Amino acid sequence: MDLTTKKQIFLKKGDLIEVKANSQIVIGSGMVWVTFTGDERDYVLKTGDRLNCDAPKPVIEALEPSYIVIHEQPSRYSLFSLLGAWSEEGLR
């Protein structure tokens, strides 16, 4: 079973976003630049490219209008929060 969350994001040229470490970036269309805190390597990704973000604090900048999909591993805290909220709602 795949427990990742999927975020679909549309970026305008010049937009910047930070995503969670241990995410996968998939470029649906456009071109983006990806850098990581403390890592000298940078990546330019275009339509169809994928990148696994293993280094901390990935930052993405759109070099042109872009559609990207981010697959993130949910944190343990968010899973427990969801279960707690679900159980509270179910008990009412």
Image (tube, rainbow, N blue to C red):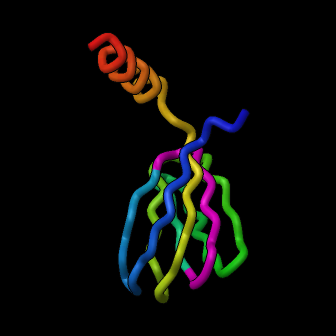
Front one among 53 and 41: 53
Tell me: residue 29, above or below residue 6. Answer: below
Quadrant in which residue 17 is drawn: bottom left
Q: Main secondary structure of the magenta part?
A: strand
Find residue 32 and report its image quarter: bottom right
Q: How many numbered callouts?
A: 0
Vertical comparison of 28 with 37: above or below? below
In the rendering, at what x and y percent does residue 4 appear? 60, 41
Residue drawn 62% across and 72% down? Answer: 27
Q: Position of residue 18 (x, y in %)?
A: 40, 58
Q: Is residue 86 left or right of residue 70?
A: left
Of residues 8 and 56, the one drawn nearer to the viewer in this rendering:
8
Q: Tell me the quadrant of the picture where the N terminus can be found.
A: top right
Residue at the location (70% across, 65% down)?
50
Percent position of residue 19, x then y = 45, 54
| Name of the residue lying farthest toward the top | 91
Residue 82 placement (x, y as % from top left)? 40, 26
In the rendered view, tell whether residue 15 sits above or below residue 3.
below
User: Which residue is at 64% across, 65% downward?
Assistant: 26
The quarter of the image holding the C terminus is top left
Q: Residue at x 61, y 46 (%)?
A: 54
Most distant residue in the left direction? 92
Q: Is residue 2 left or right of residue 30?
A: right
**In the rendered structure, does residue 30 fall within the stretch colored magenta?**
yes
Residue 8 in the image: above or below residue 56: below
Q: Which residues are magenta?
A: 20-31
